[in-house]
Amino acid sequence: MSEKKINISVIGTGSWGTALGVLLARKGHNVTFCSMTESKYKELCDNHENVSALPGVKLPENIHYTMDIGEAVKSADCIIFSVASVYTREIARRMEPYVDEGQIIVSVGKGIEEDTLLMLEGIIEDEIPQADVAVLSGPSHAEEVGREIPTTCVVGAKKKETALFLQNLFMSDTFRVYVNPDMLGISLGGALKNIIALAAGIADGLGYGDNTKAALITRGIAEISRLGVAMGAHHSTFAGLTGIGDLIVTCASMHSRNRRAGILIGQGKSLEEARAEVSMVVEGVYAAKAAKKLADKYGVEMPIVNEVNKVLFEGKSPAAAVKDLMLRDNVAESEDILWSSL
């Protein structure tokens, strides 16, 4: 593990960006948090803690704070881009004039832009073509990373040397990092699992049990894999950390804002009420429409995604959605496993 200390800027001060910044600062790197709002900037400066997003995790002394995006970008050897999907293009556009050729930007968010159907790293590449854009994803709740609970993630990049640099940068005795060249598969798994987590939460809210949860997880990864392969991703990626790994943790944990929102919807609250009560961005809501468009574009069957869309946006009752999933036409579990004889 390299001992060289570098300058890192974290763009966005939500829970995940904060946790990663803390991780890197604890390793001795010089970390700058760039806040998008004055209230968050003051909170960080006054408390040395992200009280509203990551309470209980004290920020190390080698973390600095700014609201000047140009200052943050120009001073960084590596940029951690941790912005909600709906703000990704706007923030990337603001950053572009300050980004040098080949400067590394690591996209750590999870989502899809509804209009363009781009993954978040695709949006960043679209707005900042001179950057060397990579992704980091996996089963990694910020609350646990901040408390140094052992966690594993995967880094994807176009260039192997970039992936290996980032693997070394993030690796610690509580944060293990793997590499994978399949950036599309990594990002797609991270975005689509939020929709399945909404479905899992809805099932919890309806009072269903472990059998239902297991069904949603296994059939959910089947849907994600079908779409991913149709789009050009590698099937094995979805059997890894950013596929089944991220799906399991997001469907099972109360740290998951998507699952929590789903529980409230299953209990009878409206989408607006559920989002207000969770009080954080519920990425699965934004990804649901985009996933439906992608499924239609590539001719891929995604029944769970379809039913989640109907519950969220068409007023269908959660119980009716579950019933329709159960009563679908009979199909084989796996289309690529054939009978040896008729």
Image (cartoon, helix red, strand yellow):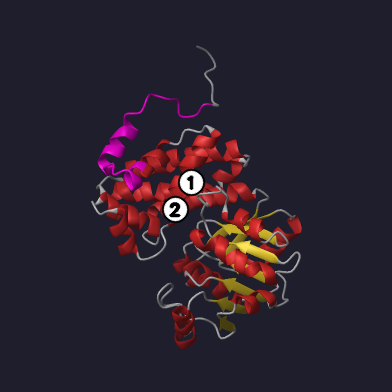
Categorize mark 2 by other alpha carbons within 10 Å: few (<14), some (14-19), many (20+): some
Placement of 56 over or under 158, stated as above or below: below
Considering depth in this image, is 97 or 246 the residue closer to the camera? 97
Residue wearing tag 2 = 286
Q: Residue 298 occupies which quadrant of the picture? A: top right
| Residue at disc 1, secondary structure | helix
Amino acid on which the number 2 mark rests in the picture: Tyr
Q: Where residue 99 sits in the image (x, y, percent)?
A: 70, 69
Q: Is residue 327 magenta?
A: yes
Q: Is residue 1 left or right of residue 259?
A: right
> Is residue 171 something that shows in the picture?
no
Q: Amino acid at mark 1?
A: Ala
Seen at 39% across and 59% down, the residue is: 257
Nearer to us in this view, 61 or 42: 42
Q: Which mark is residue 290?
A: 1
Q: For the point 59% across and 46% down, which residue is it?
A: 185
Residue 326 shows in this picture:
yes
Q: Give the crowd class for mark 1: few <14, some 14-19, many >=20 residues within 10 Å.
A: many
Q: Is residue 339 left or right of residue 5?
A: left
> In the figure, 59 relative to 84: above or below?
below
| Residue bounds of the magenta highlight | 310-335
Q: Is residue 294 left or right of residue 307?
A: right
- Asked if residue 314 is among those painted magenta in the image, a careful observer would answer yes
Q: Residue 104 sits in which quadrant? A: bottom right
Relative image position of residue 311 (x, y in whole percent): 32, 44
For the residues labelled 2 and 1, the Cα–Cα distance comes to 7 Å
